[in-house]
Image: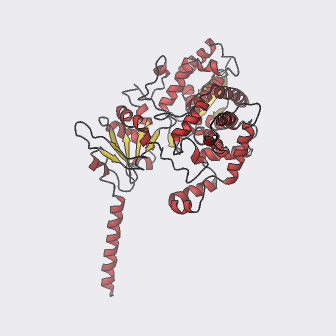
Amino acid sequence: MNQEDLYWFTFILVMLLGFFTYKLLTRHRSYFRLLRVPFERPHFLYGNLDDVLNGKLTTMEKIEQYYRKFSTHGLFGFFNYMTPALYVRDPALIRQLLQPNMGHFESHGYFLDEQKDRFLGSQLHLARDASKLASFLTPVFRNPKAASAMDETTKVCCKALVDFIASRVELELELKAIFLKHTLNIFAGISFGRELNTFEDDTDRFCAIATGMAYGTNPIQVVKTMAFYLMPGLMRSAGVQFTERQEIDYLVKQYQKAASALTGPSMARLLSQANEQLQAGERLGDEQLTAQCATFFTKGFEPTLNLLSFATYELAQNQDVQQKLYEELRNGGIANKMTPPYDSIRSLPYLDAVVLETLRKWPPHPLLVRECTKLFTIPATENGDRASIPLKVGDKLYVSVWALHRNEQYYPRPERFDPERFTGTAPQSDVFIPFGIGRGCVGQDFVKLVVKATLVSLVQRFTLRPGERTAEPLKLIESASSVEARDGFWVRLEPRV
């Protein structure tokens, strides 16, 4: 082959490779056009994420732009890089499609499943047979004894939190880092009956394992995550599991110790007692029960931590709201009680409104994902604007709770923190879904209790002031499943006189 032929051969080969690469990257570009679903024309490499990649917006904020743009449509399309994502926008359509058809959308589309991790994969939010597990867990989580167990643990942990802050009063504190230790103390006691005080000592092995489950910070787990994404078949055939065997064995021992304890109520003990009431063939093993206790860290930790952080930030920024909350505590006779009982906290309507408004403005799960587990067809619109949409197993529907909760049609002046929206008025279930669709989160009452008890402990002892190191308005960044303040939550706490 002479030099000229080699040149033309190379040229043609490069052109063919470029053409097929381009076709591969743009193979989904007609997806929404064929379905007659409104969408924004995407870039062939990064889809609709231009403002996300250059740091101007988070994904939630970018989706909110399209949510507003396609306000007359029940569905809209969004390209997450090269992957099309179908968003259900209209609350009526959410109610029509998802709520009565949850049997077709049982999966949340999480990375982990029972194949990658038999231990964590048996948790309620990851289990394939979730309905059966939910029928067992729901009565346990809603048992009055569970609230009592949380009440005692929360009192002790709130006192440790207040003592720690009191030793640093008048300083500007980054509260999320402090709340991380506080939440770890509470959840360790509630789930496994562990009495921790991480403000004094956080070297316990339980702390390392629990935070690793909450944030996936274990280096080995990071490598495994990459391997599961790149070589899922090889990892499954090799029998690799996400959680290390020694960590599972350690947690099982913690569960067994708490379950057999004669004193100190914990979720481990309540689960064990409920399990004994089942028929022999229906009982869960110790590993499965331990996994349900670990859910406090894998599923409940980050939402609780963020909710606490955003609530205290809003109280510091809105002195009138904080003062009204303090007046409610004082009028209820609990302003000077270090650890008021849960029944007293639960009966405070304005405190409840503060928590609900925080959930509205800063939802712990800003994006809901439902993966199709059975064939399903979204019906065509009556006016013919959109054809029916057949969904295959594995297809996903998305709901932006973030955008829904900031829709001016349902919440006037949505950027304003206004607990009055919920005073004397129950949230509308169609447009207020901070804990998901369907049965919701079985642990949501636990999350609210932790947040309420912590807020009461802080507000009755301290006046919260905005810190100078927190930008206003907040600059947000994305975490694994939520949003958080880029510069932290800096608050100055002054003793009440």
Q: Is residue 483 visible?
A: no
In this view, the residue farthest toward the bottom is 2
Give the quarter of the figure containing the N terminus. Answer: bottom left
Q: Is residue 76 visible?
A: yes
Q: Residue at x 35, y 56 (%)?
A: 44
In this view, the residue farthest toward the front is 280
On screen, residue 39 versus residue 128, left or right, reads left
Color encoding of the figure: secondary structure
Give the quarter of the figure containing the C terminus. Answer: top right
Please, is residue 199 above or below residue 390 in the view?
above
Q: Quadrant of residue 350?
A: top right
Q: How many marks?
A: 0
Give the x, y percent position of residue 324.
Answer: 56, 17
Q: Quadrant of residue 270?
A: top right
31 and 263: which is toward the camera = 263
In this view, the residue farthest toward the left is 383
On screen, residue 421 versus residue 269, left or right, reads left
On screen, residue 177 versus residue 405, left or right, reads right
Q: Quadrant of residue 458?
A: top right
362 and 388: which is toward the camera = 388
103 and 17: which is toward the camera = 103
Give the x, y percent position of residue 321.
Answer: 54, 20
Please, is residue 310 above or below residue 86 in the view?
above
Please, is residue 52 above or below residue 424 in the view?
below
Give the x, y percent position of residue 372.
Answer: 42, 46
Please, is residue 53 above or below residue 144 in the view?
below
Give the x, y percent position of residue 357.
Answer: 50, 26
